[in-house]
Image (cartoon, grey):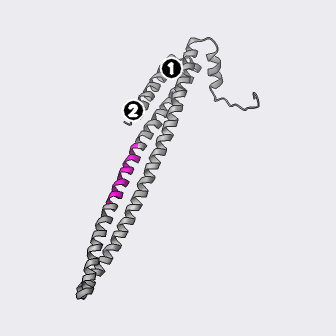
Amino acid sequence: MSGGEFHVHGPHDHEVEHAAHSGDPLAGRIAMMTAIFATIGALYGYMAGATQNEALLFKNEAAIKTLEASDQWNFYQAKSSKQNLAELGATLTTGETQAKYLQEIERYKKEKDEIMAAARKLEEAGKEAGARSAASMHVHHRWAQAMMLIQIAIALAAITILTRNKAIGIGAVCVGGVSIVIGVLALAHI
């Protein structure tokens, strides 16, 4: 404990810290690489969370638009029922009453056309929001993949310091490089 704070080291942190301060050039380079990878990993973590939230917002918007379209189609059906009753009334009556029903039929037809246009517009907006959600989720998966690989690279870097095996260090650099490529793909929304 120092200064009233409690700090917990990971299993390899102490050894990495010790090796970095030992004057060993390999340890210093690996410690620097680990710090860079950790920083990149933090950015990946933030971006993964941001794109996941974005995907959820778009999915919510899609659901709302779909429900609004459903409401419009229900309203359309109600107008159709009223139009059918007016048509029955026009068939069963004559004179002024029939003319009144014929006016109602025309009004319902016009209202139904407006409702249908609104419902179709809402359906389209729901589909667009759903597509944006899927695209954001794809980008989220890219960020998550990049994050997983950068964490593996950090672990390999720690193993390199502990084992002094330069081949594992090269593996850490390669895995970190692949992680960066995937991060660039996520940034480009690919």
- The residue located at (47%, 43%) in the rendering is 52
Q: Quadrant of residue 183?
A: top left
Q: Quadrant of residue 19?
A: top right
Q: Is residue 131 magenta?
A: yes
Q: Which mark is residue 169?
A: 1
SS assignment at label 2? helix
Q: Residue furthest front?
A: 96
Q: Nearer the viewer, residue 59 or 177?
A: 59
User: Residue 44: image x %, image y %?
Assistant: 49, 33
Predominant SS of the magenta segment: helix
**Label 2, residues with CA under 10 Å away: few <14, some 14-19, many ≥20:** some
Measured Cα–Cα span from mark 2 to mark 1: 24 Å
Query: Magenta stretch?
Result: 120-135
Is the C-beta separation of discs 2 and 1 under 8 Å? no
Above or below 27: residue 102: below
Q: Nearer the viewer, residue 144 or 109?
A: 109
Residue hosting label 2: 185
